[in-house]
Image: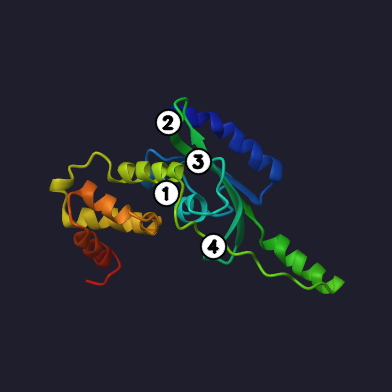
Amino acid sequence: MQPILKTYFPIADMIAGSFGPACEVAVHDLSQPESSVVYVANGTVTGRQIGQSFDHLVKLVLLNKDFQKDRMINYRFDLPDGKKIKSSSALIRDEKGEVIGMLCINMDLTASLALQKALDGFLGLTQTGEVSLSLEEEPGQDVLSILDQLILKIIGTADVKNLSRKKCVEIVRFMDEKGIFLVKGAMDKVATLMGVTRVTIYSYLDEAKGKR
């Protein structure tokens, strides 16, 4: 783990303690993408645990049009159990300016939204629709640099020429789940780094999705 990330642990505890049991804070080490979670304050909100990977970094943060100044504030997602989550994420950089981690705040809005609905019914107000998230077609260079580093970290120091097909499929599945291939040019970049063709990456994807 990047040592500087430990300095964010007390901050995570402070934020979670300040906002109560509906607030969860996680610290990620992005130098280890497959087990990026290195600290969790109040993991009861989403069930976050140390050793898990990031979920929304690419799709809802880096590729969002509102991602600015290393942070994305107040984006929404739902959990499988129906919880409504409002989240904010900020990248953590080292003294050289390299992105090494991320601080994420997750708020459970389920009870608040139920109360809002009840109040709206009582007051006779009409609810407005939710604002949907939109993705940038062309991410900025800084975002592309971060994604490039993620791809390199996911592949790691493995001897790609001697990797088994099973391991290659696992790597490609992980990248697909994390939204890496939503980025223009990512498919070709991954193919080059793994020493295979674009067609081979597609075959790995098909196998990962059970299409082979």
Q: Give the residue type that dot 2 points to.
A: Gln
Task: Classify residue 156 as left or right of residue 165.
Answer: right
**Residue at the spot x=42%, y=49% of the render?**
53
Q: Which residue is mark 4?
A: 79
Q: Are marks 1 and 4 in contact (CB under 8 Å)?
A: no
Give the alpha-carbon distance from disc 2 to disc 3, as whole Å.
12 Å
**Residue at the spot x=60%, y=58% of the render?**
85
Q: Give the residue type that dot 3 points to.
A: Met
Q: Dot 1, how many residues are within 10 Å of its Cα: few (below 14), some (14-19), or many (20+)?
A: many
List the single residue furthest toward the right.
Answer: 123
Q: Where is residue 159 shown, x and y percent of the image?
A: 17, 42
Q: Which residue is mark 2?
A: 2
> Which label is found at residue 102?
3
Q: Earlier in the sequence, mark 1 or mark 4?
A: 1
Q: Is residue 81 above or below residue 1?
A: below
Q: Secondary structure at mark 3?
A: strand
List the single residue furthest toward the left.
Answer: 162
Give the alpha-carbon distance from disc 1 to disc 3, as whole Å.
12 Å
Q: Is residue 204 above or below residue 69?
A: below
**Residue at the spot x=63%, y=64% of the render?**
131
Which of the two residues, 105 or 195, is positioned nearer the viewer here?
195
Q: Where is residue 52 shown, x and y percent of the image?
A: 42, 48
**How many numbered callouts?**
4
Q: Where is residue 138 shown, x and y percent of the image?
A: 44, 54
Give the alpha-carbon distance from disc 3 to disc 4, as whole Å.
20 Å
Q: Earlier in the sequence, mark 2 or mark 3?
A: 2
**Residue at the spot x=28%, y=50% of the render?**
189
Q: Earlier in the sequence, mark 1 or mark 3?
A: 1
List the single residue furthest toward the top.
Answer: 95
> Which label is found at residue 53?
1
Q: Where is residue 210 shown, x and y percent of the image?
A: 27, 70
